Amino acid sequence: MLKAGDKAPAISLLDQNNKKVTLKDFSKQKVLVYFYPRADTPGCTQQSCLLRDVRKQIGKTIIIGISPDEPAKQLKFDKKYDLGFTLLADTEHVVAKAFKVWKKKSMYGREYMGIERSAFLIDGTGKIIDAWYKISPKDTATNLLGALGK
């Protein structure tokens, strides 16, 4: 698992507008990268909307959400809830694997691979400030505010 002080893995994915986005695009700024299992599901919606609601309190910190959903589904999710931040499509799970959040999961006795809801606060040089694996949807915004001293 990644931890504070580790270099964040590279990110290069399409956003909800089919534009390529990299982590380097945000050098010199803090970035919260959060992984969620699927757009427009109850937990993911709660997590994303709570982050949307704290945007004015986090200064210039950038928020980036990542899920396996296609860009078109990310765009629909963004518009439906007026999220207003970057949502990236990791359809091949490359970035999720690099961040070590693509895990074996089980539900109702069925095992499958999926996203372990997690979040990472990254500084302007690409180093991880904080890493939260298995984070609950409601704690993502709270943990971000705490890490930023807000």
Image (spheres, rainbow, N blue to C red):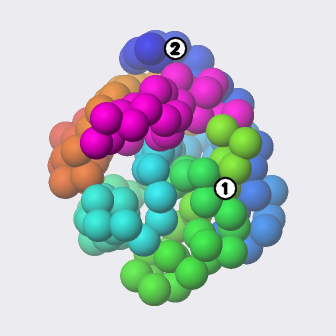
Rate crowding at label 1 as few (under 14), some (14 to 19) or many (20 or more) other CA atoms within 10 Å. many
Q: Which mark is residue 106?
A: none
Q: In this orientation, which residue lies closer to the viewer: 122 or 73?
A: 73
Left or right: where 74 falls relative to 119 = right
Residue 123 in view of the camera: no
| 3D distance between C-alphas at marks 2 and 1 | 24 Å
Camera-side mark, 2 or 1: 1
In this picture, is 45 found above or below 132? below
Residue receiving disc 2: 6
| Residue 36 picture location, percent across and down | 44, 50
Residue 144 visible in the shown view: yes
- Is residue 149 or residue 70 the one in the foreground? 70
Please give the count of numbered marks on the rendered protein.
2
Q: Is residue 49 magenta?
A: no
Secondary structure of the residue carrying numbered label 1? strand
Q: Residue at x 44, y 14 (%)?
A: 1
Q: Residue at x 60, y 51 (%)?
A: 68
Residue at x 19%, y 54% (from the top left corner): 138
Residue 106 forms part of the magenta stretch: yes
Is label 2 in contact with label 1 (beta carbons under 8 Å)? Answer: no
Q: In this picture, is 68 found above or below 82?
A: above
Q: At which x and y percent is residue 143?
A: 22, 41
Q: Which amino acid, by three-letter code, is at mark 2? A: Asp
Q: Is residue 13 left or right of residue 114?
A: right
- Label 2 Cα crowd, 10 Å radius (few <14 / some 14-19 / many 20+): some
Per the image, the residue denoted by label 1 is 89
Estimate the x, y position of residue 148 in percent, counting from the top left: 28, 41
The amino acid pointed to by label 1 is Ala
Question: To which quarter of the image does residue 121 belong?
Answer: top left
Query: In the displayed structure, would residue 114 be above or below residue 99?
Result: below
- Nearer to me, 119 or 92: 92
Q: What's the magenta region?
A: 94-117
